[in-house]
Image (cartoon, rainbow, N blue to C red):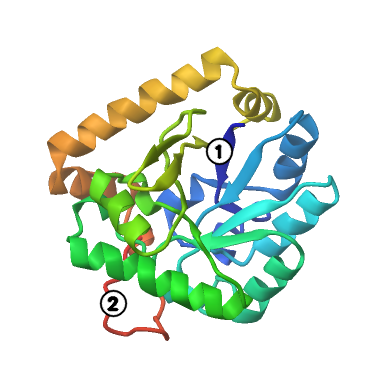
Amino acid sequence: MNALMYHDVVASGEDDSSGFPGRDAALYKITPDTFAAHLDAIQGDVIVTFDDGGRSACAAADLLEARGRIGHFFVTTNYIGTRGFLTDGEIRELAQRGHVVGSHSCSHPLRMGHCSSSQLLDEWSRSRAILSEIVGADVDVASVPGGDFAPQVAEAAARAGITRLFTSEPTGDARHAFGLMLIGRFAIQRWTTAETAAALAAGAWLPCARQAVLWNTKKMTKRLGGERYLQIRKLLLGHGDEVQWGDHRDQGSGVGD
């Protein structure tokens, strides 16, 4: 079963109303009409995931439920209750409605694969504890922020009690490592058509292969460019993606995009 990676469902022109602000984040935000068209086009089983924990999750849940589907909503816990993000009550409501709530780390590091082992364990352990307390049940599923995956990310997640970890690798093949299951996802962006979303969900060779080629090229560019890649990216996209809202849960945490 393939998994699709969404972020926010917002009205046209209201990109910053849910989730992280800025041009970079806006590339992954779609309108309610587009999301509805995707769901209507998708046939069979598919895992529909949402990263970041933006407030539009509630509207997305309505559209999913109208079609008999559930979503996986991965929440960046440092941002809970801040502008554009879900509140404790909304997260609890999503879980009560039958949706899956999971961790998207505490601070959303831009390069999670480059974090220290202690920071990785802290990101997964604290976010999991916060969400478990909110929903009143054990939260053992998560997704990797920023698409920056490395073996130590999975190892720390397993040590923190995560049993299923979604990545940004565009593959339909799940694999096991460090005692947890790693699940790839196909990214949905603002220009993704309903036809393409349905093809990705079905595992059609050409659109899946295209994403794999682009993802591996970007991965290599990041690896070779390092910090310079991030600097060039910010120059090209502008600095809107660096806007940070206050973190009321842990003022000491570094907050990423």
- Which residue is found at the position 57% from the left and 37% from the top? 3
Tell me if residue 243 can be seen: no
Query: Disc 1 marks which amino acid?
Result: Ile
Tell me if residue 125 can be seen: yes
Above or below: residue 89 compared with residue 51: below
Residue 102 coordinates in the image, percent (x, y): 53, 61
Q: Quadrant of residue 256?
A: bottom left
- Which residue is found at the position 66% from the left and 75% from the top? 92
- 246 sits to left or right of 131: left
> Marks 1 and 2, Cα distance to the nearest angstrom?
29 Å
- Which quadrant is the C terminus positioned in? bottom left
Q: Quadrant of residue 159?
A: bottom left
Query: Disc 2 marks which amino acid?
Result: Ser
138 and 92: which is toward the camera: 138
The residue indicated by pointer 1 is: 188
On residue 61, the disc is none
Above or below: residue 215 compared with residue 102: above
Judged from the image, the secondary structure of the residue bearing numbered disc 2 is loop
Q: Residue furthest top?
A: 206
84 and 12: which is toward the camera: 84
Q: Residues within 10 Å of mark 1 (few under 14, many from 20)?
A: many
Q: Residues within 10 Å of mark 2 (few under 14, many from 20)?
A: few
Residue 224 coordinates in the image, percent (x, y): 14, 34
On residue 253, the disc is 2
Above or below: residue 195 compared with residue 182: above
- 190 sits to left or right of 38: left
Judged from the image, the secondary structure of the residue bearing numbered disc 1 is loop
